[in-house]
Image (cartoon, rainbow, N blue to C red):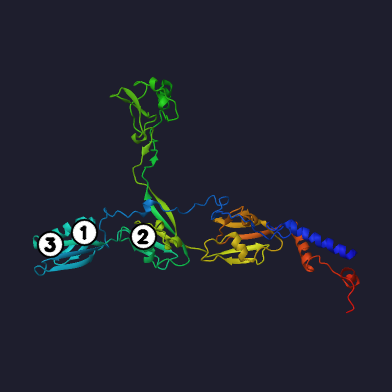
Amino acid sequence: MRIFSSGLACYGMGLTLVGLTGCQTDSFVDPSVTGRWEHQPTTLPILRRIHAIEIGEQIVGETPSREDLIANDFSDYRIVPGDVVTVTAFDVYQPGQPVTVDRVVDQSGYVQLPEIGLVEVQGLLPEELNPSVRAAYGRLLGAPQVDAALVQRTGFRFTVNGFIAQPNVYPLVRSDLRLLEALSQAGGILDNARYAVVRRRVQLDEPIESEPEFDRSVPLDLDGLLDRLEGGAGAAIGATEDTFIDVDALTESTLPEVQTPNEIGASPWRWDTSSGAWQKLGASQHLAGVVQDESPVFIDRVLRIPLQELRRGDSSLDIVVRPGDSILVERVGDGNIYIDGEIARPGPYGIPLNEPYFTLSRAITSAGGLGPLAEPDKVDLRRIVGQDREAIIRLDLAGIRNGTEPDVVLRPSDQIIVGTGFWNRPMFILREGLRSNYGFSLRLDRNFGNDVFGFPSDS
């Protein structure tokens, strides 16, 4: 009975350990078991960028706006070499018979027309083409019946490159050409293509202010500048909106008239003779040495279009292609990640080409799961963040699978190292001890079997 009691005690201790782990919590005995185990559903974001280690990287791409769906305005288009024009003229060879020709504008800006030869059309608006050609035929026919039209524009172009069947530079023929049609011209969207990054040049509406360079050959009159400061006129030198100025104390004698921007100490005030009061001038009037540069300023705007959503029919993503657009088609994957440490199958793993969300949790699953000594909250991610620069950040896989931390999308060349803890090996030995004889089982031999089950019957 003593052995029987010891066996029951050990068996009860095993059940207690199992009970302490809980049915809906991560296992204390086996920390490599991770999960949420809750009935209540939850939703978490998936991170494509880790701000803590990728501060210097620029977020590429924005979502399209309503203006990106409006057709182009080609009303100011002017004919350039390479354009195609169609000319129909009557009474050239036979009375009442039309002659129709299609001509490509040559590199000199001319088209060759029947009977009249070369006619210059470069630089004309589309509506100016017909009168110009009619005037050229008028020198031969008097009052001709001529129709001329621009049928193909080549002055506007767009570029498609990247993961596409036919990367090239294409003419933008129609003013309402959409992204899906443009990609169809380049061979269509491939199955592994994920994003189209559209780089678009736009002009800033407001001019950029710049300070003029002073003539350094002219000596600076410091004495005159000090006199003006002491006399009160200097109160307005370099005044800003945050500077307190007693307007009532200003008189015509204390502040000069408007001076040239290059003059030291130019006043932002002037005397208005019509109202008899001092008025502060705006920035557009070249005050305080600031001059506006009227030249146009252009910047690049980047749009990021998810192609699978576009192919499924999301019309808000089918933007209108603008002249000069550069379209780069990206695909998912195309690289390896490297998993090491306490993992079932360490080594390099290719990112699936058709998997847009190949995250840390999914990568661990692909590698066979965590090893028996793994510590899920000790996962190092090493990532290339610049030229010859690598960043290391610690991630919590247990938190990701518990639903308290967002998962992270992996990139090519990422390295994942799974760590371990001090108590992981003792707990592993304990687990293996329980498994060696299927737990602390109850063993009865022939010497004590009769005490438990009774003597066997004679029959």
* Front position among marks 2 and 1: 2
Three-letter amino acid code at the position of disc 1: Val
Upstream in sequence: badge 2 or badge 3: 3
211 or 415, nearer to the observer: 415
Give me the C-alpha separation between circle 2 and circle 3.
Answer: 37 Å
Q: CA distance from mark 2 to mark 1?
A: 29 Å
Q: Quadrant of residue 212?
A: top left
Q: Is residue 48 left or right of residue 445?
A: left
**Viewer-closest of 255 and 193:** 193
The reply to whether residue 232 is in sight is: yes
Tell me residue 250's x, y (percent). Answer: 38, 21
Residue 129: x and y, percent? Answer: 20, 58
Dot 3 crowding, Cα within 10 Å, few <14, some 14–19, many 20+: some
Residue type pointed to by label 2: Arg
Determine contact: label 2, label 3, CB under 8 Å: no
Q: Amino acid at mark 3?
A: Gln
Q: Earlier in the sequence, mark 3 or mark 1?
A: 1
Dot 1: element: loop
In the shown orientation, is residue 143 left or right of residue 48? left
The quadrant in which the C terminus is found is: bottom right
Report the residue at 35% width, 63% height from top.
170
Kindly identify which numbered label has been placed on residue 178.
Answer: 2
| Residue 389 in view | no
- Mark whose residue sits in front, 3 or 1: 3
Residue carrying label 3: 145
**Residue drawn 68% across the image and 60% down it:** 33
Q: Residue furthest bottom?
A: 459
Sequence-wise, the earlier of marks 2 and 1 is 1
| Residue wearing tag 1 | 121
Vertical position of residue 200 compared to residue 213: above or below: below
**Distance from the alpha carbon under mark 3 to that under mark 1:** 19 Å
The answer to whether residue 425 is left or right of residue 211 is right
